[in-house]
Amino acid sequence: MNNNNLTIDSIINMLKTYINLTDYTLITKSFNYVKNYIDDLNTLNDYLEIASILTTVYADMETISASFLYHLLVLEKVSETSLKEEFSSEVVSLSMGAYKLDKIIYSTENDYLVEYYKKVIVGMSEDVRVIMINLANRVMNMRHINRLKREDAKKYAKESLEIVSPIAHHLGIYKIKSELEDLSLKTLKPDVYFDIVEKLNSTKKERDKLINNMTLEVKKILDENHINYEIKGRSKSIYSIYNKLDKGRKFNDIYDLFALRIMVDSEILCYHVLGLLHAKFKPIPKRFKDFIAMPKSNGYRSLHTTVFGVNNTLFEIQIRTFEMNEVAENGLAAHWSYKENRSAATLSSTDQKLEFFKTVIDNYQQKASDDNAYLEFKDEKMHGNIYVFTPKGDVIELPNGATPIDFAYKVHTKVGEEMIGAIVNNKIVPLNYVLQDNDVVRINTSKTSSPKLSWLKIAKLNQTKNKIKSYFVKERKDEVISFGENSLLKYLKKKNVSQVEFFKEKNVSKILKELKCKDLKELYLDLGNNKFSPKTVFDIINPSKQTNVLEKEIKLKNNYDIHVSGISDIHVNIASCCNPIPGDEIVGFITKNKGITIHRKKCHNIKGDRLVNVSWNDQVKNLYLTRLNIYTNDNISHLTDLIGKISSIGITINNATTYINNLKFNYKISLYVKSTADLENIIKVLSKQEYITNIERA
């Protein structure tokens, strides 16, 4: 429908097709309220078009009302307080949510930013209906994108394609996803778009004839078996055709240009119809997909099969129930339909939003490959997020408790390093000020300024702290190298050893190889950072003067959790290959210059005769790292659930990664425990989950 033909009455008539109420005055009231502030007819028509888009996905009255009102907040015509005087808290909350999303300035410069802004959109939305308003607004603007200058239009289309459309996909709203993709392609690659349209039009008559003949054949089969059904020819989106052409396929080889969709009353009938069709038409085995038994993460359920139909033409056929079709078309919005006289949504939108949020978080976690990124993820997940803005309107996502220092480093490391102060909402604040949602933050900088060690106690994010630490490591590197060199030279002087003799080329090569340093500078740096002592370096060249481990002459500190037979004061390391924990049977392995390394008795790395008896002390004070491999029977990620269950019993997680094997999600999780009893408890708790098939200690 052309937006010039839309009226508030036509919107209400659309609502009546799925909401059975006696009073629709909220829609009229909110639209008339907007008209008091805006008299431009074209603008009002745009607002009506957004509302009409929302009716196609069964939006409720509160959502449509908010889709009118939030524009007034964006234009600063009204305040939240004034809206509260006229409308319910629900409508105002949705309006404020849509207003916050509208303030976001997107960037698609790289994959990280694309994922980041998807995450921001979801994180900022207390109610998934807020995202629906944002999607409808995006569709309206894409339909009228010719209003923008060419470069602005391309930027807007790229955002729609890479950030907004995937969110519609996650929510399962096919019609919005598909329209955004097609309109984006039309803007970004008009030649390709119109070439596909021309090819579709040139083959339309032939395709319509084949689809009609196939439909008649299928109807005959279903009628003979007395099945209640509805059947439709399914059109392939232009963007999906482009994707296949872009991968090297020829237009004539895209066989799912010929497609049918069959809707029936029950799940059992879906499989019955599948059997009837396969009995008549030869299927292609590798093209069969059962999304009923294994639904997609966005709730999509359907059977897909490809068969040789009339004239040996390949047809893709989708078989689903009427309810499944509603969800497939409208995603989560299908649950807001007031059909069958329902007076409230059948599913909690908050729960649905949470599920989507988990999906985004899991995807983000799988991209985070190092410990720092994982800690950052854990900060955000466990403590919640806030969203603050730069003076230019760019949104910055931070965990609760974040300070201007975190904000500065999030903007750019250089901004953080040169920061001298912060202004929040036009007021000077101290650097330990705790930022709040929607704060506008300005960072004052000076090229002569530098970070302070005290900032480590103020910063909230591990990422910020690591950047501050890195600065000081870099700044004092020369100082540390000089200190390390002097400490070795002093030790040589103490031992009356000639520097010329000690630093002969063969000696230096031996030292660097033994301690795995690339040059003397790195050796001195490690000495300065106390990675090892001057004595360790000295003993490599002077083994005759090395002390004997078994004669208790190594005076390094024990961690007191482990008793070494016959030795009371020796340096003990925990082997990373087998990660023994209290309760395991253990053995000590004497290592050159590094004391004793503790292994599990069954460890395959235990070889030779340099072994010593060790045992755990009765009172163990430390936590020990262990790793679990968790296998599932599911093709849906449960990482967030696993993290929550482990954390709920007081266990600290060190790292967690996801990998897929045979289309099943598996997990590698490392964590800190006090004993094997802790480990057994974790395995017992996790094993109760139906999706877990096996848990192994790595």
Image (spheres, rainbow, N blue to C red):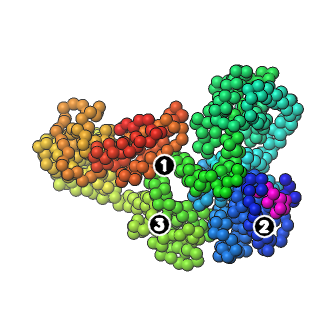
Q: Earlier in the sequence, mark 2 or mark 3?
A: 2
Cα–Cα span, label 3 and label 1: 22 Å
Q: Is residue 694 left or right of residue 233?
A: left
Question: Which residue occupies 37% across, 52% down?
Answer: 649
In-front residue for pair 518/84 = 84
Question: Which residue occupies 56% across, 50% down?
Answer: 355
In-front residue for pair 24/240 = 24
Q: Quick check: is 82 in the magenta stretch?
A: no
| Residue 150 in view | no
- Disc 3: which residue: 401
Percent across and percent down for residue 445 are 53, 71
- Disc 1: which residue: 640
Label ID, residue 462: none
Q: Which residues are magenta?
A: 6-15
Percent across and percent down for residue 280 are 73, 21
Q: Residue 549 lies in what quarter of the image?
A: top left
- In the image, residue 467 sits, relative to residue 321, either above or below, namely below
Disc 1 packing (10 Å; few <14; some 14–19; many ≥20) = some
Question: Residue pushed farthest bottom?
Answer: 427
Q: Earlier in the sequence, mark 3 or mark 1?
A: 3
Of discs 2 and 3, which sits in the foreground? 2
Q: Amino acid at mark 1?
A: Thr
Cα–Cα span, label 2 and label 3: 42 Å
Q: Amino acid at mark 3?
A: Gly
Disc 2 packing (10 Å; few <14; some 14–19; many ≥20) = some
- Disc 2: which residue: 28
- In the image, residue 209 sits, relative to residue 389, either above or below, namely above
Q: Secondary structure at mark 2?
A: helix
| Residue 646 in view | yes
Q: Secondary structure at mark 3?
A: loop
